[in-house]
Each structure stands twice: as structure tokens, then as C-alpha cells.
């Protein structure tokens, strides 16, 4: 039985109905279950606590006020909430959702640009490199590497095939290594 | 779980926000907004 944060919760349609009828306890349960991962997702995507708070507020207000468009038979509530958070985030960072290819200039880059750095230096460089990734790639990294979701769970949330998650993650890692190598040269 | 340097650094970065959560006041504001909308 799946017991992690992505475990399905068969009682959620009932909790949602109770929440929308003004039941505080039902809201508390849904909020405590879903707010932290939604907040973390937006924080890791945007790098901004203010944006994360704003998006969480928007998502849960929509949930309280009827969660229009949510059909329990089409999937778990968590996918619907991530979907709302993604749309809210995309509205704030519209330009960032363009597709970006690797530059393909043929210049070799360091296979391990983090070598020789302290942990703090490596994390700091990675934070900047991650923030510079196109959103499609960044969210593959956030879901699969940082939240440690399975490819299948990430695919369900994003509404894409598992192979797409795999290829986005591979490309994201290549882009990160390339950007980290450049940072090393420029440092 | 991958153990390559990039994955390890990503997990170290993730650890910085592993316990991140919206401030408690946000939940109170949501409930207050909900009650206002009912009234």
C-alpha cells in the first residue's frame, strides 16, 4: 500500500463536499494534507515565498468556493490542486514557459562542474542554475529530484506521458550541467 | 535514488525547503474570507 505524500485518498471527494458546506474540520484535513506540497512546489519553482503564499491562497480559496471543474472520477484531488497552482504560477511568469532548446554549440562542458566546491557553494550555484531553467524542465527537476516523486506520479500531475517526464528530466540535467560549467568558468 | 553529484546537490538544495509551509496566518485568512463570502 502506498503511504507516501502521493498516496491516494479515497475520502477526498467527501471531504471536499464537506469543506464547501462550511465544515472547518474537513477544510483543516484537506489543507494540512495538500498545502505543504503545493507551497513547496511554488516556492521551488519561483524562488519566492511571497509568490508561494499568493498561489496557495488562490488555490485554496478556489477549493473552498467550489473547485469548479474538479471531477473526482478523473483523478485525485492533488493533481487538480497542482494544476491550479501551475496555472497561477504560469500567469505570473508567462514569459518563462517558452520552450528552450539546448544551445547545441558543440562546446564540451565539464561532466562534474560541482567537483571541488563546498556543499554551500554547490547548492548556491545550483540554485541559480535551476532558477534559469525553462519552467518545463525546472518542474521536472522539482517533482522528480527534489520532491522525489516517481515518474508516473509526475506524469499524472503534469498530464503528460511518462516518457516525456523522463526526457524533460534528462534535458534538464544536461542544461544544469552546462549552466554550472559556465558558472565555473565565469567565477 | 541517484547518487551522482548533481542529484546529491539537488537533494541538498531541496533540504533547504523540505519543511517549508505557508504561514499559519494564511489559513486563518482563508477561513475568514470563506465566512465573509457566506455572509
Image (spheres, coloured by chain):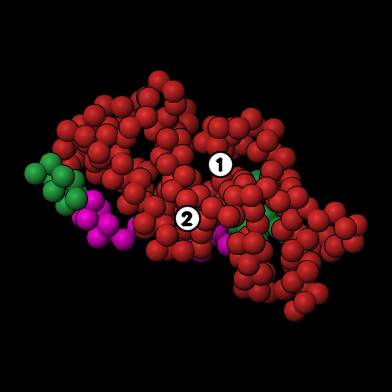
Chain colours: A red, B green
Residue at 31 percent across and 27 percent down: it is: A13
- Kindly identify which numbered label has been placed on residue A171: none
Viewed as shown, does residue A1 lie left or right of A152?
A: left
- Kindly identify which numbered label has been placed on residue A149: 1
Picture quadrant of residue B6 = bottom right
Q: Position of residue A78 (x, y in %)?
A: 42, 37
> In the depicted view, which residue is nearer to us: A58 or B31?
A58
Residue at 56 percent across and 46 percent down: it is: A143
Picture quadrant of residue A133 = bottom right
The residue stretch that appears in magenta: B12-30
Task: Give the answer, above or below, for where A120 lies relative to A175.
Answer: below
Q: Name the residue beneath numbered marker 2.
A: A92
Q: Position of residue A62 (x, y in %)?
A: 31, 41
Residue at 38 percent across and 25 percent down: it is: A71
Q: Chain of mark 2?
A: A
The 10 Å Cα crowd at callout 1, few under 14, some 14 to 19, many 20 or more, is some
**The magenta stretch spans residue B18:** yes
Amino acid at each position: 500500500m502506498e503511504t507516501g505524500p502521493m498516496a491516494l485518498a479515497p475520502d477526498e471527494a467527501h471531504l471536499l463536499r464537506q469543506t464547501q458546506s462550511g465544515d472547518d474540520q474537513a477544510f483543516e484535513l484537506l489543507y494540512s494534507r495538500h498545502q505543504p506540497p503545493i507551497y513547496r512546489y511554488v516556492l521551488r519553482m519561483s524562488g519566492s515565498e511571497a509568490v508561494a503564499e499568493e498561489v496557495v491562497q488562490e488555490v485554496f480559496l478556489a477549493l473552498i468556493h467550489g473547485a469548479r471543474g474538479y471531477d473526482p472520477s478523473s483523478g485525485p484531488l492533488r493533481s487538480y490542486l497542482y494544476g491550479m497552482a501551475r496555472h497561477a504560477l504560469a500567469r505570473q511568469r508567462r514569459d518563462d514557459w517558452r520552450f528552450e532548446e539546448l544551445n547545441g554549440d558543440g562546446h564540451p562542458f565539464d561532466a562534474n562542474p560541482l567537483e571541488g566546491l563546498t556543499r554551500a557553494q554547490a547548492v548556491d550555484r545550483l540554485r541559480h542554475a535551476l532558477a534559469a531553467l525553462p519552467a518545463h524542465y525546472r518542474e521536472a527537476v522539482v517533482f522528480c529530484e527534489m520532491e522525489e516523486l516517481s515518474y508516473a506520479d509526475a506524469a499524472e500531475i503534469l498530464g503528460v506521458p511518462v516518457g516525456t517526464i523522463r526526457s524533460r528530466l534528462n534535458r534538464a540535467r544536461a542544461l544544469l550541467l552546462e549552466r554550472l560549467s559556465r558558472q565555473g568558468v565565469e567565477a | 535514488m541517484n547518487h551522482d553529484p548533481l542529484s546529491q546537490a539537488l537533494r541538498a538544495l531541496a533540504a533547504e525547503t523540505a519543511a517549508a509551509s505557508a504561514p499559519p496566518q494564511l489559513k486563518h485568512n482563508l477561513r475568514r474570507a470563506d465566512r465573509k463570502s457566506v455572509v
